[in-house]
Image (cartoon, rainbow, N blue to C red):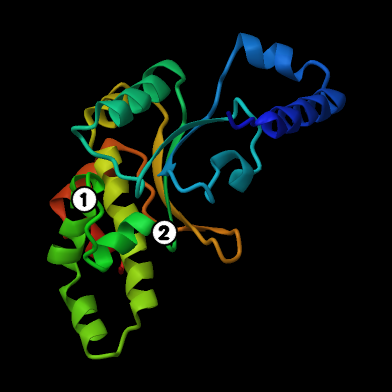
Amino acid sequence: MTSLKYLFDNNARWAEGIRAQDPEFFDRLAHQQSPEFLWIGCSDSRVPANEITGLMPGEVFVHRNVANIVNHADMNCLSVMQYAVDVLRVKHIMVVGHYGCGGVGAVLEQRRAGMVDNWLHPVRQIMEHQFAEYRSLHARGVMSTQALWDRLCEANVVQQTRAAFETAIVRDAWARGQELSVHGWIYSLSDGRLRDLGVTVGSLAEADAIAEGEPFLAQTGL
């Protein structure tokens, strides 16, 4: 049997370090969590929410899946969102993708990946229905494969941000006057920096204005 003792050793050193800095930290953490943030991100091991944002345990509630998708039929994601919004009363939902996302790359390269193919259907829809111009540029050699991949990663974040603020969970929170904003961000593995894609929505009025206007993706300039 393979032993993972080194992980327990790492954990002991981490816990001792935290307690040395703040002797009461774990006592407070054990009795309450009151995060202001819900992070909906990719399962990629290179994109850890707390470390990227410099937040401590207890400061960010996290849901992760392949390609950071907000699917209205996914009871896991919706349950996390409802608990975060209705019980924890988070003030911000961040939908966070990353450049070099393997799930997005599989769609771009039309690779069969098994069960996850079904999960990636929303990304495939973006590629098929909203990326005609980019695909044409790529086919003519005007746009590199890397650039097309980057744009698709960004577009996926934008669309999943919209999926998040179109849930009844978020709209009901706004309807009862709860302070809540939904943001779309993307993370770069190459430099460790987050980028705001400029798709923050913080009210029913803003959400309805988007629904009545041109497609959300077009409004972002992507």
- The foreground one among 138 and 154 is 138
Residue at position x 26%, y 67% from top?
A: 108
Front of the two marks 1 and 2: 1
Query: Are discs 1 and 2 less than 8 Å apart at CB?
Result: no
- The foreground one among 12 and 78 is 12
Would you say residue 161 is visible in this rendering? yes
Query: Quadrant of the image for the C terminus?
Result: bottom left
Residue at position x 44%, y 62% from top?
A: 99
Residue at position x 64%, y 12% from top?
A: 30
Q: Amino acid at mark 1?
A: Asp
Q: As drawn, is 108 to the left or to the right of 10?
A: left
**Few, some or many C-alpha atoms within 10 Å of disc 2 (few <14, some 14-19, many ≥20)?**
some
Q: As drawn, is 132 to the left or to the right of 205?
A: left
Would you say residue 220 is visible in this rendering? no
* Res 152 → quadrant: bottom left
**Few, some or many C-alpha atoms within 10 Å of disc 1 (few <14, some 14-19, many ≥20)?**
some
Query: Quadrant of the image for the N terminus?
Result: top right
- The foreground one among 134 and 179 is 134
**Which label belongs to residue 117?**
1
Q: Is residue 169 above or below residue 113?
A: above
- The image shows residue 70 at horizontal and vertical percentages of 28, 40
Q: Is residue 172 above or below residue 117?
A: above
- The image shows residue 118 at horizontal and vertical percentages of 18, 46
Read off the residue under disc 2: 197
Mark 2 element type: loop
Mark 1 element type: helix
Q: As drawn, is 6 to the left or to the right of 48?
A: right
Q: Is residue 123 above or below residue 204?
A: below
- The image shows residue 200 at horizontal and vertical percentages of 39, 49
CA distance separating discs 1 and 2: 26 Å
